[in-house]
Image (spheres, grey):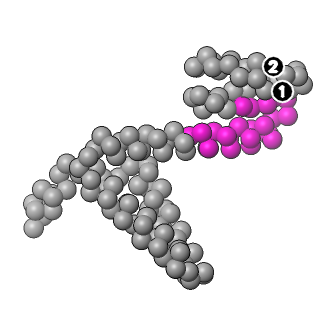
Amino acid sequence: MKEKLYRFLAGRYGMDDLNKFLFALEILLIVLSFFVPNVIIAILFYLVLVLYVFRSFSRNIVARSIENQKYVRIQSKITHTFKAFFRSLKDRSYHYYVCPKCSQIIRVPRNKGMITITCPSCRTQFDKKS
């Protein structure tokens, strides 16, 4: 029986960051459905569950990997934006901005007016008020 399971799971995609997010979303929807019983929440739960199982057992590893890379790119932009915001709140002598291309956090001094910021990693230039 164990060998049949191993053969079935061989070559399957498994878990990645997007699947972890989908799993956390399922738990959130379950908890939410206890407090606010709603048909829409139940439908969302089942859609996320089907997507989670489909991605976990998929044999198309390249497509699932591309999906995960897109998710990680979006997630990093969001988390870096929040990190930059909170760093700007803590450090009163510098502003922290996120590069629009590579999402790197860039520190610039305050009270310099409109400046052109060059990202040190990807060399993208963008204008911001410091």
Q: Main secondary structure of the magenta part?
A: helix
Name the residue type under label 2: Ile
**Residue at left offset 41%, top offset 44%:** 68
Find residue 43 and report its horizontal and vertical position in percent. Answer: 47, 73
Left or right: 77 in relation to 94: left
Question: Residue 112's quadrant in the figure?
Answer: top right
| Observer able to see residue 28 | yes
- Per the image, the residue denoted by label 1 is 130
Q: In which quadrant of the rendered image does the C terminus lie? A: top right
Which mark, by number, is residue 115? 2
**Residue at left offset 60%, top offset 39%:** 77
Question: Residue 6's quadrant in the figure?
Answer: bottom left
Separation (CA) of disc 2 from disc 1: 7 Å
Which is nearer the eye, 47 or 121? 47
Find residue 83 and report its horizontal and vertical position in percent. Answer: 68, 41
**Residue at left offset 30%, top offset 53%:** 14
